[in-house]
Image: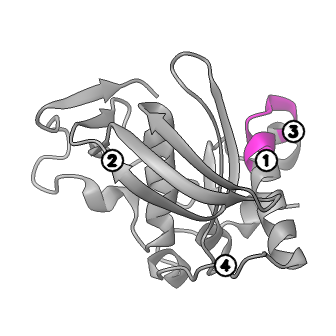
Amino acid sequence: MITMENIVRDGHPALRTVAEEVQLPASEEEIKQLSEMIEFVKNSQDPEIAKKYNLRPGVGLAAPQININKRMIAVHVESEDGTLYSYALFNPKIVSHSVQTCYLTSGEGCLSVDEPIPGYVPRYERVRVKGTTLEGENIDIRLKGYPAIVFQHEIDHLNGIMFYDHIDKENPLKQPENATPVGG
C-alpha cells in the first residue's frame, strides 16, 4: 500500500527526470504498482481511510512521485457535471489539445509539494489522451475543464515538469489571457 511516506518531495531528482515508456504488455510488477497508485488516489479521497493512514487528499498520482521512472499515471476525479474519470494508465499521451486555455481559480497543488504555491497555471481547456489500461486495453479519451487540467498535471510529471513551472514568475496571480476560469 502506498502512503505519504512513499511520495517523494519537491527537490527529489525523480521529479525532474523524463520517465521511460512501459514496455507493453506490462509486467506483473508494473501492473501491481499502477494498481496501488489508483488505490492510493481513491483512498486519499475517502475521509475515514485518509485519516487512518494520514493521507493528503489527491486527484492524481504519477509514478515519478513514488520514485518509479515509468510512464504511469492514476487519476480519480469528477468533472463539473459529476462525471467520474477514474483511470490508471500506462504510457498516457496528449495526442491533441484545444487552442483555448483554462486555469484553476484556486491554483494547483501537488502531493509532492508540501507548501501552497500561489499562482495561476495555464492549461489547455480540452485534451485528447491515449493510453493503455491495467487490463491492456488501448483507450482514447476526450477531457475538458477540471479533468483535462488533472491529466495535464500528471502527464507533466512524466516529463519532469512541475505545475509551478507554468506560473508567470513576474505576476503569479495575473489571470492568463483569454483563459476560462475553472473551479477545482
Tell me, for residue 49, which label it has, or none. 3
C-alpha span from label 4 to label 1: 30 Å
- Residue in the image at 16% along x and 34% along y: 175
Q: Which of marks 4 and 1 is nearer the N terminus?
A: 4
- Residue in the image at 49% along x and 66% along y: 157
How would you classify the magenta stretch by its main secondary structure? helix
Task: Pinpoint residue 79: horizontal percent, then vertical percent.
Answer: 54, 26
Circle 1 sits on which residue?
Answer: 54
Q: Earlier in the sequence, mark 3 or mark 1?
A: 3
Name the kind of residue labelled 3 in the image.
Ile
| Magenta stretch, residue numbers | 41-49
Residue 108 seen in this snapshot: no
Name the kind of residue labelled 1 in the image.
Asn
Circle 4 sits on which residue?
Answer: 22
Circle 2 sits on which residue?
Answer: 97
Assign a secondary structure to mark 2. strand
Q: Which of marks 2 and 3 is nearer the N terminus?
A: 3
Q: Which of marks 3 and 4 is nearer the N terminus?
A: 4
